[in-house]
Amino acid sequence: MNTREGGWSTVEVVASVTVLVFGLMSMAVGFCSASRLAATTHDNYLLNQAHRGFVADLQSSQFANLPAEYGPSSGKESFWLKLIDTVTRTAGEILYTAPLDPYVEGSVQLFPDESSPPSGWRGITGGLDLDADGSSNGSSSNDYRVLPTSIEITIQALDGPRTLQSDMIITGTR
């Protein structure tokens, strides 16, 4: 007569350990994926914060002074987002001088020229009537009513640089 003593057999132990290892590995992969997703979401948040901050700066300026304030060689055609805390990457204010370790940087380009629309803008052919005089005469308009603007912001993300391109038309009265 063959009697079995209490306890676990080797097959039962190996099967239990295998199931446990696969379960723990699946959890580790899930946590890593969640962490990456959280970092990507935060990077996208910083891109949007930089965009909103810069657009707020544009809106606080006088419409007539935009090309002088943000045009070439104005010192404000490039900008950076200041991080309040570099560990948690908390967004701060927009800077117009480069920090030592730029994490979010951007540039703006204004188009006061009626002859050519900004490159990459789809659906706009020919010139733009920026001064609302009924023709696009191909010259730089000093009396414009609308101002095509392009903003590009880049963040140094975990998976490489990520860029937000924003094209808009700013309207105003002179």
Image (cartoon, rainbow, N blue to C red):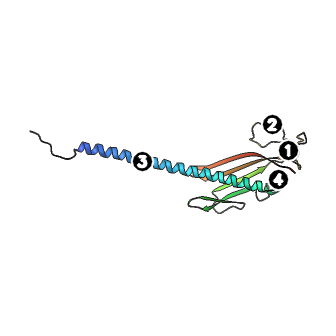
- Amino acid type, mark 4: Phe
Tell me the residue at 71%/62% (across/down): 97
Q: Position of residue 84 (x, y in %)?
A: 62, 62
- Amino acid type, mark 1: Leu
Image quadrant where residue 26 sits: top left
**Of labels 4 and 2, the one closer to you:** 4
Q: Of the numbered discs in the image, which one, if any, rests on residue 130? A: 1
Observer-nearest of 72 and 48: 48
**Disc 4 secondary structure class:** helix
The reply to whether dot 1 and dot 2 touch (C-beta < 8 Å) is no
Q: Which residue is mark 3?
A: 27
Q: Position of residue 164 (x, y in %)?
A: 67, 48
Q: CA distance from mark 1 to mark 2?
A: 14 Å
Looking at the image, tell me whether mark 4 or mark 2 is earlier in sequence order: 4
**Disc 3 secondary structure class:** helix
Q: Which residue is mark 4?
A: 63
Q: Which residue is mark 2?
A: 125
Q: CA distance from mark 2 to mark 3?
A: 54 Å
Residue count near mark 4 (Cα–Cα under 10 Å), binned few <14, some 14–19, many ≥20? some
Looking at the image, tell me whether mark 4 or mark 1 is earlier in sequence order: 4
- Amino acid type, mark 2: Thr
Q: CA distance from mark 3 to mark 4?
A: 54 Å
Q: CA distance from mark 4 to mark 2?
A: 25 Å
Asked if residue 78 lies left or right of residue 19, the reply is right
Asked if residue 151 lies left or right of residue 46, the reply is right
Q: CA distance from mark 1 to mark 3?
A: 58 Å
Residue count near mark 1 (Cα–Cα under 10 Å), binned few <14, some 14–19, many ≥20? many
Observer-nearest of 75 and 168: 168
Looking at the image, tell me whether mark 1 or mark 3 is earlier in sequence order: 3
User: From what the image shows, is residue 29 above or below residue 76?
Assistant: above
**Disc 1 secondary structure class:** loop
